[in-house]
Image (cartoon, rainbow, N blue to C red):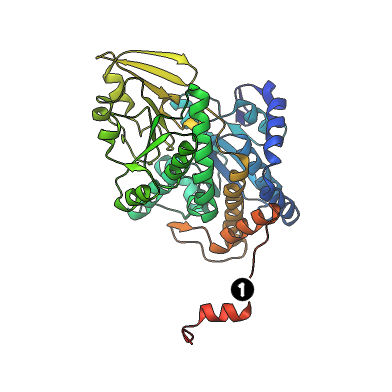
Amino acid sequence: MENSTGFDIKNPGLAEQGRRRIEWAWQEMSVLQLLGHRFSQQRPLDGIRISGCLHITTETANLARTLKAAGAEIVLCASNPLSTQDDVAAALVKHYKIPVYAIHGETTEQYYQHINAALDHQPVISMDDGADLVSEIHKSRHELIPEMIGGTEETTTGVIRLRAMAAEGALQFPIIAVNDAMTKHLFDNRYGTGQSTLDGIIRATNVLLAGKTFTVVGYGWCGRGIAMRAKGHGAKVVITEVDPLRALEASMDGYQVMPLIDAAKISNFIITATGDKHVVDKQHMQVMKEGCILANSGHFNVEINIPALESLSVDKHRPRPSVDEYTLTDGRKLRLLAEGRLVNLAAAEGHPSAVMDMSFANQVLCAVHLANLKSKGKPKLANAVHNVPTELDQEVAQLKLAVMEIGIDTLTPEQQHYLSSWREGTL
């Protein structure tokens, strides 16, 4: 439902259901609660226009609420056509007065229309899941660049794209790689992706994992989490890698490591988590086992070569929601989950709120950091991809420990001196 006052959502009637689910997630997001309370009094984002191209979920809703409490004028659009929760979009518009342009299952044309509607907000800070917002600014909305203070990026895939832009000298404003914060990739990518990916696969298929051969393509932080959780379900986990150090690590973590062409012949499940294109390709599909289930947990739907799968097939039907079964020319059947899109969001609800709490706390603190550079007259960051300042990352960890009621030790002055000096050694 499009409205001239500034939103495009599926059904405003879903707003009450969305509000209840947003409040449920809020109970698990204690760090954002603390930041929301602090910044609602300080208002460090007063007058700051933010456009976010993010997954429209209950957790993102609570990020938006926190940014608004801090004074930001925020508009949201979807970063994935299948991750939008329509009831959440409706609640954001009706109950929280935050404009949203997002509809579950929107077409590619609608997707980019919504991105441009969010950019019509004339943001000075961008927030991205996959760098589509920043990419669109650089491709077709150059008029916005002079006013941009900077942006943040939440995903591994987006950071890869943005670093490529920076390397080519194409990036015209600074980006903070929230994805690379220790409190993001150690927890969100590993524990969040691990749990939510398995949740999406199980919801979509209701297939038992125990005893099955479960191949994870890519052993980054997301791959590590997926492998760990699959092993916990009793699956026989295989890792495929192109990085020798990660392959060695996977082997020493107890997993079988082999080329994907060999894993394809024995796998019941193949899950991608690389951020790259066509890592599961035609030659792999040609040797896959009957009934192999394919899913993607990387940001874009390019990791599995779907056109190749289509070219090998003589029939396609949908036996269950989020499952497309392809019958190949030789009679084998391969099952693709969630149209090759992020299985944890397209077939389930995404990461647990408690891990998104830390990731989104980083988003809030980085937005405040960027705004402070402008308000205090400090030099603008260079047009590059920057790490989250260490002190902000540490603050998120400290706040999370506090709400979990976990205490830690502190260094004594003597210990601090010893660690900062080279003069003492063996006595």
Q: Is residue 164 or residue 124 the one in the foreground?
A: 164
Q: Is residue 246 or residue 373 the one in the foreground?
A: 246
- Above or below residue 162? Residue 5 is above
Disc 1 target residue? 411
- On the rendered structure, is 293 left or right of 105? left
The answer to whether any part of residue 14 appears in the image is yes
Q: Is residue 267 or residue 86 the one in the foreground?
A: 267
- Above or below residue 179? Residue 15 is above
Query: Percent from the top left, x then y, of residue 214?
Result: 39, 33
For the point 43% across and 40% down, the residue is 227
- Above or below residue 313? Residue 152 is below
Q: How many marks?
A: 1
Query: Percent from the top left, x then y, of residue 412?
Result: 63, 77
Q: Residues within 10 Å of mark 1 (few under 14, many from 20)?
A: few
Q: Which three-letter amino acid code belongs to the residue tagged 1?
A: Leu
Query: Percent from the top left, x then y, of residue 367?
Result: 59, 53
Which image quarter is the N terminus in? Answer: top right
For the point 67% across and 23% down, the residue is 14
The answer to whether any part of residue 149 appears in the image is no
Give the quarter of the image for residue 353. Answer: top right
- On the rendered structure, is 245 left or right of 388? left
**SS at badge 1:** loop
Give the quarter of the image for residue 5. Answer: top right
Query: Percent from the top left, x then y, of residue 256?
Result: 34, 41
- On the rendered structure, is 42 left or right of 120? right
